[in-house]
Amino acid sequence: MIATLALLALLPATGVPTVVELPDPTATTISMQVLVKLPELDARELAEAKVLAALLPDGTEEITRYQLKLWTSAEGESFHCAVLPDHLRLSFSVPKTDLAMAGLIIESVCRRATLSEDAFKSALDDLSSRESSYWAEALDPRIPRFDRIKQSNVAALYAHLFRPENIWIAVGGGFQPGDAIKDLADRFADWNPGVDHYPRFHPVGDPKLLDVRTRPITTVELSSPDCRVDSPSFAVDLVAASAMAVGKGSAVFRVAREAMGLSYKQDAFLWPSAGGLRLRTIVTFSSHKGEENVLSTLRDGLMKQVSAWTTADLDRAKAMLRASMVDGIVAGPICLSMERPLGAGLADRTTLAGYWRMKCGASFDETKLLESADAVTLDQLKATATELLTKANASVISGRSAGTSHA
């Protein structure tokens, strides 16, 4: 990664969302990442948000679904949407010569998405009957309520969320500094969405959390309190996450895979939450008798690993952090998608720049953050990791199998 890239931002003016620029003269593409902040959603609003994310690729009043896919499929990241705990994100890439077309797409999707009745019915049918992967269930165990949702509900949520003060547009890649800001400012200058009349009450209640799945696969989790990205101590949290999570020498790999011999998948990462980023340790294995003891064994094993850390583990954590954020050799300790943690690619860097601006109102300064990480001491690392593990909430999604029973 080029750490000295210019990073520019435009604060919202009348009708203009926040725009974050990450120009990279070496890039041959442009990455567009639109982050729409989500409030606390009740179970039905969560379902509506998922339907909305499925509807947005269907096109706008000016752009058909086919055109949207065609225009954004040349550079590897065609237009797609995802719902995360604290934001809805629209992502795509275009050739570096197509900045104006990218701006056209964003402005049109943010202001005039089609949200047709036919597409709504299709998306609702698909989402309400689809079985998610076990990993997607582990990442987001919230259960949406798709009953009694209407197209008008989704349209109302769209109008509520897609407002200039609630949108952050991150643009990274091969363009000149200031070009993206000017293009988008011109396009959104006349946007006046009017008074937001969306209901302020939540009649359904918070989403319930999945605790049993139909497949014989169990996932257990330790989830820490929020780590605030605008806190001076975040660099310590980041190094702790690297030591816990990144690579085969990480604490989670040593305990879950090597010491406990659990199969399938184990991972740890900083995950978006309302208050910041939350360290989540998730371990997946075949369901079996005695699985209720896995969590306590996992926590105890991780605590022993942390207490035994030496300067070699500290140096390794810092090196792996740079290997992920600067060199892109491994995935890093921050995960902002349902697929994988962030690396050093253009789309990931652009996403992080926009997310940082949304979360703390400041530009992401990789150089400063890594300098702060380099200054973290072994005592700070062990104390922070111990606190995160001690305060972590434990949860289980248990799989049904012949060897397990569930109430």
Image: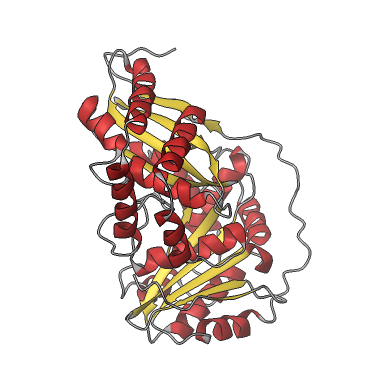
Residue 31: x and y, percent?
Answer: 41, 72
Check the image and tell me how it is coloured: secondary structure
Left or right placement of residue 84 versus residue 192 in this view? left
On the picture, is 231 further left or further right than 402?
right
Residue nearest the viewer, comparing 211 with 224: 224
Q: Can residue 294 be seen here?
A: yes
Q: Is residue 130 visible?
A: no
In the image, residue 306 above or below residue 130: above
Question: x and y percent of residue 353 in the render?
Answer: 49, 66
Give the camera-side residue of 302 and 357: 302
Q: Quadrant of the C terminus?
A: top left
Q: Residue at x 29, y 40 (%)?
A: 250
For residue 159, what is the image quadrant? Answer: bottom right
Give the quadrant of the N terminus: bottom left
Q: Residue at x 72, y 69 (%)?
A: 193
Instruction: Locate residue 187, reporting x and y percent.
Output: 60, 82
Measured from the top left, where is residue 52 in percent x and y? 54, 55
Residue 330 found in image quarter: bottom left
Task: Tell me if 289 is positioned left or right of 125 in this view.
Answer: left
Who is closer to the viewer here, 263 or 325? 325
Q: Quadrant of residue 188?
A: bottom right
Q: Residue at x 49, y 30 (%)?
A: 392
